[in-house]
């Protein structure tokens, strides 16, 4: 029996590696997934130089409170931090589709924000996905355009026993996918877009349609 096991083990070890086929674009998809994960880590850590290495200088980003270039986004984040704002990103898995030198990366994520409403400390958690257009230029993948599709969010007080009173009118200005996040941001002076993509919305459908057209277009 021992010799038979040994024989089988030796047979397993000598399977030619050429017979083990690697899925198409696997390395590129892994590289892009790591790129997306790095963006959140460097952004939350304030590592601006490394964050710049994940995006193109002419790239753009659209979120609840911001719409512009990545460089302007960095400047806006730095300013908000000086004012005491605090936010973090928690990311899940990334799915990547590559066509030539273009790719779409979709990443499940949560945005965690701490702020104040009438001097009451609150936490907001918003769940959704990053929807990225990624390009390969000069043999390097970087994010060229980032959108966010918002799913749902919650708001709670930080200190048990505190009470915060929300304005129904302000809440209903925004869709349910990011209603509480928008409430906090707009309450503190932010200019929040009320028509961003949410799960299952027409804006989300159009975002994905245009991105897929871009992915398969000839540059």
Image: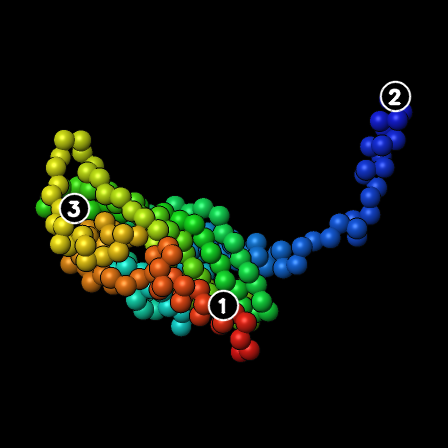
Would you name the residue on which mark 2 appears?
A: 1
Residue contact at pointers 2 and 3, CB within 8 angstroms: no
Separation of residues labelled 2 and 3 (CA atoms): 71 Å
Would you name the residue on which mark 3 appears?
A: 116
Query: Percent from the top left, x then y, of residue 190?
Result: 19, 59
Which label lies toward us, 3 or 1? 1
Query: Percent from the top left, x then y, of residue 168?
Result: 14, 50
| Vertical relation: 32 (above or below) 14 | below
Q: Sequence-wise, which precedes: disc 2 or disc 3?
A: 2
Q: Is residue 9 in sight in this rendering?
A: yes
Residue contact at pointers 3 and 1, CB within 8 angstroms: no
Please report the residue visible at 35 percent of the width from the left and 59 percent of the height from the top: 201
Which label lies toward us, 1 or 2? 1
Would you name the residue on which mark 1 appears?
A: 212
Separation of residues labelled 1 and 2 (CA atoms): 57 Å
Please report the residue visible at 44 percent of the width from the left and 70 percent of the height from the top: 210
Separation of residues labelled 3 and 1 (CA atoms): 39 Å
Residue contact at pointers 1 and 2, CB within 8 angstroms: no
């Amino acid at each position: 029996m021992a010799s038979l096991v040994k024989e089988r083990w030796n047979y397993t070890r000598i399977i030619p590696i050429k017979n083990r086929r690697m899925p198409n674009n696997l390395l590129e998809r892994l590289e892009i997934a790591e790129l997306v994960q790095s963006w959140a880590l460097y952004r939350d850590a304030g590592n601006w130089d490394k964050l710049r290495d994940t995006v193109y200088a002419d790239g753009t980003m659209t979120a609840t409170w911001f719409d512009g270039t990545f460089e302007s986004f960095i400047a806006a984040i730095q300013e908000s931090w000086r004012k005491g704002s605090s936010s973090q990103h928690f990311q899940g898995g990334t799915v990547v589709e590559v066509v030539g030198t273009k790719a779409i990366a979709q990443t499940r994520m949560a945005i965690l924000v701490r702020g104040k409403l009438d001097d009451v400390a609150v936490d907001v958690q918003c769940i959704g996905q990053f929807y990225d257009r990624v390009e390969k230029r000069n043999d390097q993948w970087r994010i060229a355009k980032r959108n966010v599709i918002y799913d749902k969010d919650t708001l709670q007080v930080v200190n048990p026993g505190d009470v915060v009173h929300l304005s129904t009118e302000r809440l209903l200005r925004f869709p349910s996918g990011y209603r509480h996040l928008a409430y906090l941001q707009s309450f503190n002076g932010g200019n929040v877009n009320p028509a961003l993509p949410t799960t299952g919305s027409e804006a989300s459908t159009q975002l994905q349609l245009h991105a897929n057209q871009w992915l398969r277009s000839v540059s």
